[in-house]
Image (cartoon, rainbow, N blue to C red):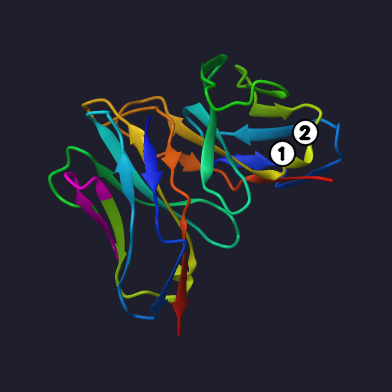
Amino acid sequence: AQKITQTQPGMFVQEKEAVTLDCTYDTSDPSYGLFWYKQPSSGEMIFLIYQGSYDQQNATEGRYSLNFQKARKSANLVISASQLGDSAMYFCAMREENAGGTSYGKLTFGQGTILTVHP
Amino acid sequence: NAGVMQNPRHLVRRRGQEARLRCSPMKGHSHVYWYRQLPEEGLKFMVYLQKENIIDESGMPKERFSAEFPKEGPSILRIQQVVRGDSAAYFCASSPSLAGDYEQYFGPGTRLTVT
């Protein structure tokens, strides 16, 4: 069974600074995908970034980067140059995948981290 | 291309009533997933459907909950005889049938309140 752990219930960061949100995972699947989603107070789920377990390089999407350490089973999200609009709940999730990196499997989510950006 | 649509956005039911939640996937998507988010928690998988088929219902409560995705029309999550513990946000996500796209696209969610 897959498990995602986010140990930081809440994080605070000053505007324009970088922040790291922690995520560790546990799985026996040889191939998997890791995701980060943002959930603002309005409630929708916004996809941020994806990392495949066989990807050699860490994923980046604009101000978001994923610090993937496979041996440690961690997939931390780094947000650079924080903005007030980054204040939200952030969820780490994972999914079993086939070797080609595609899958139609269910996502397993962590408990989330509430990020607050101070001006 | 319209995103995943869910309706209603907010639903209030009294204990014992039925709740019907609808999800229209993105155009061209034939895979639908339902997740439930209890207050202050992460999303939990409930069921995965393709057109006219339930593929994985391992996250569905054994009683009162059912889901369908007919050949025509939206996917429906049905909760019979609702109880207060069913109060939650219910999210639908869809993905395309073709390989190569790894993202599940989420709808805005339906907030169910049982009074």
State the mark number for residue B86. 1
| Residues under numbered marks 1 and 2 in contact, where contact means CB atoms less than 8 Å apart | yes
User: Farthest residue toward the top?
Assistant: B53
Question: CA gap, disc 1 to disc 2?
Answer: 10 Å
Please name the amino acid that badge 1 sits on: Asp
State the mark number for residue A59. none
Chain where mark 1 sits: B
Chain where mark 2 sits: B
Residue under numbered circle 2 = B19
Among numbered discs 1 and 2, the one appearing first in the sequence: 2
Numbered range of the magenta stretch: A60-74
User: Farthest residue toward the bottom?
Assistant: A119
* Secondary structure mostly seen in the magenta stretch: strand
* Left or right: A27 as drawn, with respect to A10: left
- Residue B49 percent coordinates (x, y): 53, 22
Q: Nearer the viewer, residue A49 or B24?
A: A49
Q: Nearer the viewer, residue A24 or B77?
A: A24
- Residue A36 percent coordinates (x, y): 38, 51
